[in-house]
Structures are given as C-alpha cells and as structure tokens.
Amino acid sequence: LSLMVQHSKKIVVASGAGISCSSGIPDFRSENGIFSQVKQLFPNLPGTGRSFFDATVLQDQGMKSAFYRFMATLKRAVDAAPPSPTHEFIKTLDDGGKLLRCYTQNIDGLEKKAGLSMSDDLQDDASRVVQLHAGLHTVRCTVCCTRYEWTAEYQTLFLEGQAPDCPDCLSRAAGRGVDTRRPITVGSLRPAVVLYNEDTSSADEIGRIWAKDMKKQPDLLIIMGTSMKVEAFNRLVKDFAKAVHASPNKRAGKVILINKTPPKGQWHSIIDYHVLGETDDWVKRVSADW
C-alpha cells in the first residue's frame, strides 16, 4: 500500500470523523461519540442523538436552543484542537503533488489548520478540501441564507441558546420601513453546518467539483475514519471507486479503507484493501516508508 501511494499521482481522500479523534474531537456513533454526549447533556430531549442533527431540530424552540448550545460547545473544542497526524499526512500528499482533492464529512476544519487550502467559495478550484457538510467557522441566515463568519459575539449567544438576528435582513427591513413597503421577515443566524434531511444550496457546486475530479482520472482512493453510513457520501465513494478502478495507472488503481470497523458486505466488491485500525498509525507507517 505504501508503494501504491508512492506510485500514484491523483489521490482522492474521503474522510470521516475518525481522523479527528486523536485531536480530541469525538466521532458520532461510538460509545463516547457526539450522539451519546447529546443524550447525556440533554436527557429530556425527545428522540435519539442522531435525531438531534436532523433538520427538524430547528422547528422546535427547545430543541433548537439545545442545538445551538451544543454546537457552540463543540466549536470551542474544535478551536483548541490541533490537526492529527492524519491531517498532516493529507497535507504531505498535497505537498508531494499527489492530492487531487480531499472530500470530508467533518465540520471541524482541521485540514486548514494542517495547512491545506480550504475555501467556502466552491467555485475556487484551488481549494484542496471540500467540506461536504460545511463547517463550524461560518453561520447563515435561516431566511436569506447570507453567510457570516462565526464571531465571538455569535459564539456567546449560541452558548446561551440564543440566535442573533441576521444583519442583512435587519438592514433590508429598516429600508422597507422608510418607504412604507410591506415589512420583510427578519431571519436568525444558525451554525452553517448541513443537517440530515436538509437541502443545501452548495449541493450543485459540490457535484460540479465532483464531476470535474472524476474526469481527471484519479488513480487511488483512500477512505479514512468513516463507517460510511451517510448515503450521499456513499455515492461519492462509489463513483470515485469506479473511476479509480478504470485508471490507466497499473501500479495504483485501488481503493483503500482505513477504519476501526470492517466494511459491510455491499463494499466487498468496491474496496480492495481494508486496514483495520487507527488512521494515525497507518499514515505514520506509510510516511516512514515513503
């Protein structure tokens, strides 16, 4: 596998929460993961820990307030977290001219701390990282969808379970008041992360980058730190796996999964190699071999 990394020239990395655990950021589904933590912190909330990250959470005031508080707490942990050896390895791939793109389910942005180019502007093809579920560094309006940087002021309000008014909506509402037109609805700001069952305006742009990278004939797919339970992510993995298996690079052209749990049956014809264990251990070995 180390030789494959050395011989490859267009690597796609698909990552999940497991690559950030050694940085102190919990995953979602493990015993001490985020879903479990939510139920421990808010035992009276209905539903499961997973349902706390469904789009319907914003329809109930109590759930929404708890969601803001939890996300602000998670952001505080993320702001203090260093990148893991796995994040550093992805940066090493980029420095070596081997990284085509990193597609991540993570919202922590630790790839940027490792030095990888990451932009909210999905038109920016120079960005080496695509955050499939957006991130904890921006907030957006629930009405007009305008995005803003997640400031210390917003952080304080979210920790209190409150949602600040959208500055853009307030400005336009003030203008309406002057010329007596019908007043507009003023939206509130929320963490810009993408929830389950939530439509996102970025889906089309992600699809554009995805299709463009497919045409570049990637020659190695490395999947790290994910149990692949999210359907959209699964489609991405399957598409890139098909492209990699068709690669003319005969010294690579494989799909590698590094994760603590084995893949389910549907993946046996897609994944060529499964490394059972921590991603940090594997990347250290590959880096030393390289």
Image (cartoon, rainbow, N blue to C red):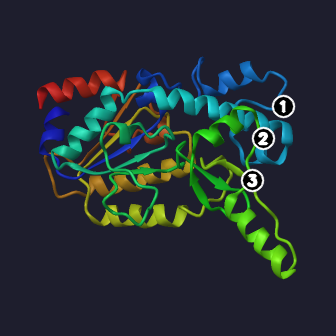
The three-letter code of the residue at mark 3 reads Asp
Residue 161 lies in what quarter of the image? Answer: top right
Residue 18, disc: none
**Left of 75 or right of it: where is 169?**
right
Please name which of the two marks, 3 or 1, marks the residue nearer to the observer: 3
Give the residue at mark 2.
64
Report the front residue among 30 and 1. Answer: 30
Report the front residue among 289 and 64. Answer: 64
Give the residue at mark 1.
46
Seen as rendered, the residue at the extreme front is 178
The three-letter code of the residue at mark 2 reads Lys
Q: Earlier in the sequence, mark 3 or mark 1?
A: 1
Secondary element under disc 2, as helix, strand or loop, is: helix
Q: Give the answer, above or below, for where 51 lies relative to 218.
A: above
Secondary element under disc 3, as helix, strand or loop, is: loop
Q: Give the answer, above or below, for where 131 lies relative to 177.
A: above
Report the front residue among 70 and 168. Answer: 168
Q: Earlier in the sequence, mark 2 or mark 3?
A: 2
Q: Position of residue 288 (x, y in %)?
A: 14, 25
Quadrant location, the C terminus:
top left
Give the Cα separation between the discs numbered 2 and 1: 12 Å
Q: Residues within 10 Å of mark 1 (few under 14, many from 20)?
A: few
The three-letter code of the residue at mark 1 reads Pro
Residue 90 lies in what quarter of the image? Answer: top left
**Left of 87 or right of it: where is 3?**
left
Q: Position of residue 143 (x, y in %)?
A: 73, 62
Q: Give the answer, above or below, for where 242 lies relative to 16.
A: below
Decide: marks 2, 1 in contact (CB < 8 A)? no
Give the residue at mark 3.
165
Q: Residue at x 87, y 77 (%)?
A: 182
Secondary element under disc 1, as helix, strand or loop, is: loop
Give the Cα separation between the discs numbered 3 and 1: 27 Å
